[in-house]
Image (spheres, rainbow, N blue to C red):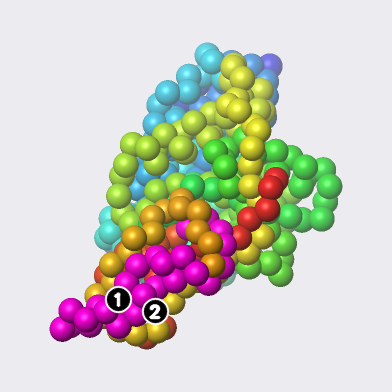
């Protein structure tokens, strides 16, 4: 018999879907509350944790987790899903990007947190010990935050433990349509130290970073990348029926390079997310307030455009776009 799944007072017996709130710490208006959904299948299988809204203006991932917990039925599931659709509710309520309005901390830079720290550090600690730590596998869903347009990818932080790393790379390959980011502690590609993914892997959970969407938008194509990616992971793990999508051609990230403005003015980009660029390619132009072209923005190397900052007025040194340098995977 599949054992019940319980996190604090939220219990799901075999064949049940339950939802409730975790209360964390105390604020002047009450505790910080985190929504939790547990879908416990009819048959034995792995436990998979899904988290979104660590950065709570990344809306496509939040919608994807909401959709998954409503469409995956206990009768069709082997194992259990432990899901947090919005991890950082105060950011969600206040429509704040990147950092918590409660203490100014970025939840994805302070893991593993600490039980005697500020409220964001307590939240990170509870998430890792009690929620993510209750599962064997974990997907942390992200997108570009406010002002960031982003190319979809999946990432895993290598630990040096062959058993974990083999499973982590397999999950990233199952999730992503093309780009994989397998990071080491000293690499310039994500996941980075301080993230929930990095901390979870160091605790023995196979945890991947999943990115699609950005700039506070909620586009169906981005939601679909997350939903189908998660379903592919569940198929790969044998949690639901069906063959996961094609697992053929992939590219692996080796580095990321930022292209910056050297002049100030109004930026008009011709490059788009996902474009393959080569050194010297013209990516756009900057005009001063008189309408004169003061800089033609050119690629400094070859790669895939992975992130575009949405600002249209730039100063000297401002980031314009970032491209991935990749190898066949």
Front label number (2 vs 1): 1
**Image coords of residue 276 (percent x, y):** 50, 54
Q: Earlier in the sequence, mark 2 or mark 1?
A: 2
- Does the rendering let one see residue 81? yes
Rendered view: 268 above or below 82:
below
**Residue on which the image places disc 1:** 286
Q: In the image, is 221 to the left or to the right of 1?
A: left
Q: Are marks 2 and 1 in contact (CB under 8 Å)?
A: yes
**Residue on which the image places disc 2:** 261
Q: Secondary structure at mark 1?
A: strand
Q: In the image, is 249 to the left or to the right of 204?
A: left
Identity of the residue drawn at 27% across and 60% down: 94
Q: In the image, is 238 to the left or to the right of 225?
A: right
Rendered view: 322 above or below 20:
below
Q: Nearer the viewer, residue 325 or 76?
A: 325
Task: Rate crowding at label 2 as few (under 14), some (14 to 19) or many (20 or more) other CA atoms within 10 Å.
Answer: many
Rendered view: 12 above or below 209:
above
**Residue 53 is a magenta residue:** no
């Amino acid at each position: 018999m599949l054992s019940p799944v319980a996190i604090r007072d939220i219990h799901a017996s075999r064949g049940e879907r339950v939802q409730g709130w975790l209360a964390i710490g105390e604020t002047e208006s009450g505790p910080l509350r985190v929504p939790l959904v547990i879908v416990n299948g009819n048959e034995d299988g792995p436990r998979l944790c899904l988290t979104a809204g660590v950065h709570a203006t990344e809306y496509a991932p939040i919608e994807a987790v909401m959709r998954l917990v409503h469409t995956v039925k206990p009768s069709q599931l082997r194992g259990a899903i432990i899901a947090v659709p919005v991890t950082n509710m105060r950011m969600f309520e206040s429509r704040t990007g990147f950092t918590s309005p409660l203490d100014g901390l970025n939840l994805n830079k302070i893991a593993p947190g600490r039980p005697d720290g500020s409220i964001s550090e307590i939240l990170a600690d509870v998430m890792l010990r009690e929620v993510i730590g209750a599962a064997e596998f974990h997907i942390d869903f992200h997108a570009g935050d406010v002002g960031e347009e982003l190319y979809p990818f999946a990432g895993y932080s290598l630990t040096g433990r062959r058993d974990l790393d083999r499973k982590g790379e397999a999950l990233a390959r199952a999730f992503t349509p093309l780009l994989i980011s397998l990071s080491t502690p000293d690499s310039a590609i994500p996941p980075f130290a301080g993230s929930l993914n990095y901390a979870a892997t160091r605790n023995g959970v196979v945890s991947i970073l999943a990115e699609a969407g950005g700039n506070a938008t909620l586009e169906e194509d981005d939601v679909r990348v997350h939903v189908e990616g998660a379903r592919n992971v569940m198929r790969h793990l044998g949690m639901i029926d069906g063959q996961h999508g094609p697992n053929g051609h992939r590219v692996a990230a080796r580095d990321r390079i930022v292209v910056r403005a050297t002049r100030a003015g109004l930026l008009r980009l011709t490059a788009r997310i996902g474009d393959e660029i080569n050194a010297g390619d013209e990516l756009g132009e900057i005009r001063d307030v008189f309408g004169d072209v003061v800089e033609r923005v050119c690629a400094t190397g070859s790669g895939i455009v992975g992130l575009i900052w949405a600002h249209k007025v730039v100063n000297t040194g401002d980031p314009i776009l970032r491209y991935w340098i990749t190898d066949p995977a």
